[in-house]
Image (spheres, rainbow, N blue to C red):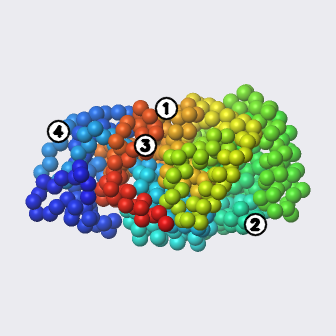
Amino acid sequence: MGMWLNKKTATKSALALWTALTVSSPAMADLMIQNVTIIDPIAGETAHQDILIGNGTIAAIGERGSIATFAPVDTLDGTGRYVIPALWDAHVHLTYDKEIGNAALPLFVANGITRVRDTGGLLSEILLVDEVAKTQGVKAPEIYFAGPLIDGIPRVYDGSPARFPNISDGASTPEDAERIVDELAAAGASLIKSYEMLKPEVFRALVARATERELPVTSHIPLSMDAEAVIAAGVRGMEHLRNIGLSCSAKSETLLTERQNMLRDGVKEEGSTLRSSIHAAQRPIAFSSQDEARCGQVIRALADAQVFQTPTMALNTRGAFRQFLEPRQREPFAYLPASVRDRWNAFADGAAETPIDPAYVAFADWSLAMVNQLNTAGVPIMAGTDTPIGLLTPGFSLHLEMEMLVKAGLTPQEALASATLRPAQFFGLEAKMGTIEVGKSSELVLLAANPLEDIANSRAIDAVITRGVVLDRSTLDTMLEEAAP
């Protein structure tokens, strides 16, 4: 199953052995990756290493030729190649676009992503996707899901207008929030996602109940609150940098009072319309009155509490940079269902003929500067895309996200950590995965070029090792071909 895989025993060929390995196997056969350069999110670059893998974990790491084995093992030649931990996309919506559906799953794995964090979808729908992913085995990522966005009343994503699908649940009282959290915990949710229309007392009840249930909460800052109040409530993460700009304004207190009045007066409006009107009224004021001292206070609070930020930079900058017009971003549309591909291409063609709105440029610039400030202050940054929103093709778009994080000021090593170690830390799994160390996960990606020299080299995937199976380049290409309509 690959030109680098050799078998030291004569009784079974490498192809037959690796084809026989399945997710249901009680233990994976031993594998030695020989003479590879390790690229670790913490330790950095270490050349000429052997890595021995057994039973789903890394059993040993040593200089080339230094690891003794007492039974035949398969070998994978890593000469001239670089190995990184398998990647996460920490912000996806697997049920957002019904026309894409489960066709997204193999696209993640083909791009080295073996775990995803789904941050909003109806519970009944995401459970079905999770079931499909489990049946697909190595051709699908492991899914960590939030279930529906927990929003206030009115809800933003309530199914109307059509551009906002129904992916949320509404909580008007603390008791509502506690009940929804309990239901999600019982259904096996991995985290809770809170949204923008929640009242302060409902939000605090949600976070408190989720904390009791040992479920991390990630959030849009509710429009009824400022960032520091949300931090104090005990959230684990925030998404899109959403509404941080409002709290960084010199007029933040006035804006907060005005938002609270708008929310009270618009309680009978459609949720998406009300949110949009608030953003339209306040964001221009906030972004034209950013206050360094005020923003520094917010950033210090985020750093002190270690609130993970998933800034979705490819999404935040797409209006200004229009990366979806670049061939390497547009060509992957071919792996989407025909109806989606046609819709996305039509949008891209139309955008190419439209002048860039200066507001998009201002927001992109602000987002880049904010991520740089957050990272410098020690706030943990995670790589997530919001795929399939924003013409961001599942799997492929994560590599663009890491590139945008580097553009914002992260080093390539920090960007790599954002897609490997940081998501593990968010879930408290850093003792098991996220770095290349003995005893940790053997989910790995073999690259043909060094991502520390250029983070774009994360795209140069030679093989993915997942759940005891080596998926070489030809196998990954076959997965992509099968995904294409």
Q: Residues within 10 Å of mark 1 (few under 14, many from 20)?
A: some
| Residue that mark 4 sits on | 66
Q: Could you say where residue 446 lies in the image, as x and y percent from the top left? A: 34, 46
Q: Judging from the image, what secondary structure is the residue with disc 1 in?
A: loop
Amino acid marked by disc 1: Thr
Residue 431 seen from this side: no
The reply to whether dot 4 and dot 1 touch (C-beta < 8 Å) is no
Picture disc at residue 458: 3
Query: Between residues 22 and 391, which one lies in front from this camera angle?
Result: 391
Q: Could you say where residue 453 lies in the image, as x and y percent from the top left? A: 41, 32
Q: Judging from the image, what secondary structure is the residue with disc 2 in?
A: loop
At 81% from the left and 62% from the top, the residue drawn is 270
N-terminal-most mark, 2 or 1: 2
The reply to whether dot 2 and dot 3 touch (C-beta < 8 Å) is no
| Residue that mark 1 sits on | 411
Q: Could you say where residue 333 lies in the image, as x and y percent from the top left? A: 54, 56
N-terminal-most mark, 4 or 2: 4
Q: CA distance from mark 4 to mark 2?
A: 62 Å
Does residue 357 appear to the left or right of 389 in the view shown? right
N-terminal-most mark, 3 or 1: 1
Q: Is residue 405 above or below residue 352?
A: above
Q: CA distance from mark 2 to mark 3?
A: 38 Å
N-terminal-most mark, 4 or 3: 4
Q: CA distance from mark 2 to mark 1?
A: 41 Å
Q: Quadrant of residue 41?
A: top left
